[in-house]
Image: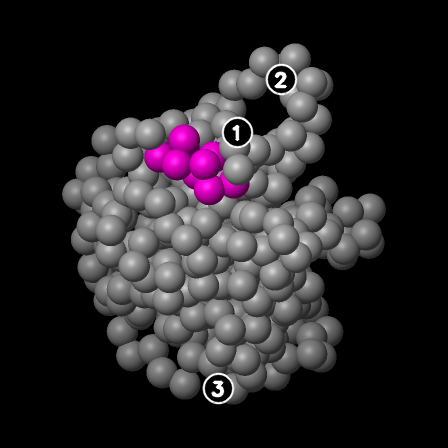
Amino acid sequence: MKAARLHRYDASIPQDSLKVEEIDEPKIEGAFDVIVRIGAAGLCRTDIHVVEGQWAPIQDPGGSLLPYVLGHENSGWVEEVGSGVTHVSVGDTVICHPLMSCGLCRACRAGDDMMCENGEFPGISRDGGFADLLKTNARAVVKLDPILEPKDIAALADAGLTAYHAVRKSVPHLYAGTRAVVIGAGGLGHIGIQCLKALTPAEIIVTDPNDKALELAKEWGADQTVKVEEGYVDTVLEMTNGKGAEVVFDYVGERGAEDDAWKMTRNGGYHYVIGYGGTVEVPTIDIISTERNIIGNLVGTYNDLAELMILTAQGKVTLHTSTYPLDAVNDAIQDLNTGNLQGRGILVPDGAAS
């Protein structure tokens, strides 16, 4: 089968980051294995960080995984199942939770799938979905409403799930009369805005440096928008009576956004860190004296993904995407890395069809 594989880590993000080549097809080996024919695979900034080598110390300290297939936002159709799989059948449309969890550890039994002690992460710790076929397990696949097409929802498997997970946790804090600030209306943020609109009555303030993104943010549910430029934090503070917002969602996590998010969080409020790449530096006395909370967000649970798929089928969450053939994976990576990609990049293998 055809697959796009990473052969070396390179912080420069070269034009030939991945090599599209022929490799062996995955095989069913265990009772709960599921092989999915990929209909679409989302391109994520985490893929950039994988290429750069940021994940290597965590997932591949010795470089033994190389070469391997990237791609952790995957959707398609069930191609083959192991003997123990009962909730999906060959031909079913599915989306894949990015983590293959064990179901037996304490975290899994508590429903915190993304904290699985024995989990594997296709596209990061093993072969992913930038290919014709993906091998995953029964616990990872969510059967979809047949009205949903893989190319329209693949990126919801991680970007959407991560954005939804953060919003889902914030619901108790965003009652009527509260405000939520969304930093970044891009690939993650535009999903977060829609989730906030669907799940909470909060007033939504969106910040972004791109005028077009801010225009689109209003269509997705933003009540007010602020362009990221000198003095924009003060503007947001004025809009919140000088106090800041009850919840600030930082979907950027670098280039100063992590500092601005803290400044825009009111006393007793919640600073949700979703994007990453930078460093949050806060004096401990500021945390103690204001009781502001910094909350990390790692993907989301299987149930989060199932709930997000319901919202999507109801038309309450839609993805803004740009589609590329699998052969153009390096073009897509460069577009993402240079900021020329609007919304989420979606890779579609040759001949992908339901």
Left or right of 132 on screen, residue 313: right
* Residue type, label 1: Trp
Q: Is residue 275 visible?
A: no
Q: Which residue is mark 3?
A: 147
Measured along the vertical axis of the image, is residue 172 above or below residue 320?
above
For the residues marked 3 and 2, what is the alpha-carbon distance in whole angstroms? Answer: 49 Å
The residue shown at (82%, 46%) is 106
Residue situated in front as seen by the camera: 248 or 301: 248
Check disc 2: other Cα within 10 Å, few if <14, some if 14-19, many if 20+.
few
Query: For the magenta stretch, what is the residue range?
Result: 232-240
Magenta stretch holds residue 293: no
- Which badge, 3 or 2, comes first in the chain's sequence? 3
For the residues marked 3 and 1, what is the alpha-carbon distance in whole angstroms? Answer: 41 Å
Checking the image for residue 285, the label placed there is: none
**Residue 98: x and y, percent?**
55, 56
Q: Which residue is mark 2?
A: 286
The residue shown at (68%, 55%) is 175
Measured along the vertical axis of the image, is residue 332 above or below residue 57?
below
The reply to whether callout 2 and callout 1 are in contact (CB within 8 Å) is yes
Left or right of 130 on screen, residue 142: right
Position of the C terminus, as image quadrant, is bottom left
* Residue type, label 2: Asp
